[in-house]
Image: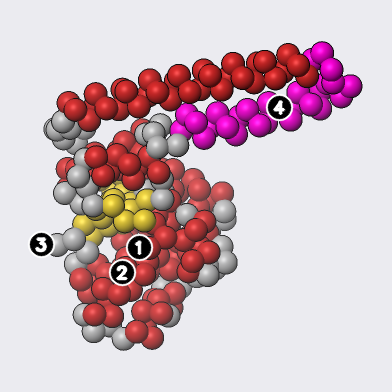
Amino acid sequence: MRQRFVLDTTAITDSALREKEHYTSICESANEILDLIALARLKLEISCYIPYPSVYSELVSFLRRNECNENTFIKLDTWLVKKTPSRYEVKIPAAIFYEYIISVRQKINRGRRLAEDYILEASAIGKSSEKLEEDTANLISKFRDKFRTVMRQGLLDSAPDLDVLLLAKELEAGVVSSDIGIKKWSEKLGLRFVEASKFPRMLKEYLVLVGVKEKDVLQVGDFGEGKE
């Protein structure tokens, strides 16, 4: 059976992936990962998909902000299969929706309690602080960070995240991401999940085992001309 993978934006842009593979920039990591995907397509018939337009547009915008060259986008359009998930045809068990609603409710309750704690802390600052504006700004910054962690971690909080899961479910494909929410709900849907930071090395291992010379795989950046 041919292997298929659906990629989230973090499959290309993840900072842990760049550190692990010693990439010096997002553009370098994008080019080398896309070169690996190209080799895997040609040698192993492994297909890598990206939800269109949601995740594709998100990734393109990210790469353009980082001023990647045009060859990066040519590779992106050539080797990643752009597909819109069949949102009206993919069937998701009702138990998954039930569990998701419970998760959302728990997040809301935790967010409310966090807000109450910070309101009390802000009230105390207002009574005692000599640097009211600075202390209030610091408190707001701390609240935003904690609120983001409480509300978003482990939760599907965007349409692109959901599209990744729907397309993987439709294609019976693996999911490649570093997002905790996508990982959690991939597992609940019974989907294969691959950490973004491990995906390049997995492809390299596959390629070496089918006879691609290890030095060629390790120098995969030379496969194209887009390395920054």
Marks 3/2: CA–CA distance: 16 Å
Q: Earlier in the sequence, mark 3 or mark 4?
A: 3
Q: Please report contact status of discs 1 and 4: CB closer than 8 Å, yes or no.
A: no
Q: Indicate the quadrant containing the C terminus: top left, top right, bottom left or bottom right.
A: bottom right
Residue 36 seen anywhere in this rendered image of the structure = no
Position of residue 93 measured from the top left corner of the image (x, y, whole percent): 16, 30
Q: Earlier in the sequence, mark 1 or mark 4?
A: 4
Vertical relation: 157 (above or below) 80 = above
Q: Earlier in the sequence, mark 3 or mark 2?
A: 3
Mark 3 Cα-neighbour bin, 10 Å: few <14, some 14–19, many ≥20 = few
Q: Which residue, given by chain and number where applicable, does mark 3 sit on?
A: 1
Position of residue 147 measured from the top left corner of the image (x, y, whole percent): 55, 28
Q: Please report contact status of discs 3 and 2: CB closer than 8 Å, yes or no.
A: no
Marks 1/3: CA–CA distance: 19 Å
Q: Which mark is residue 199?
A: 1
Secondary structure that dominates the magenta span: helix
Q: Which residue, given by chain and number where applicable, does mark 4 sit on?
A: 139
Amino acid on which disc 3 is placed: Met
Q: Earlier in the sequence, mark 2 or mark 4?
A: 4
Position of residue 90 measured from the top left corner of the image (x, y, whole percent): 16, 35
Amino acid on which disc 1 is placed: Phe
Residue located at (21% from left, 40% from top): 189
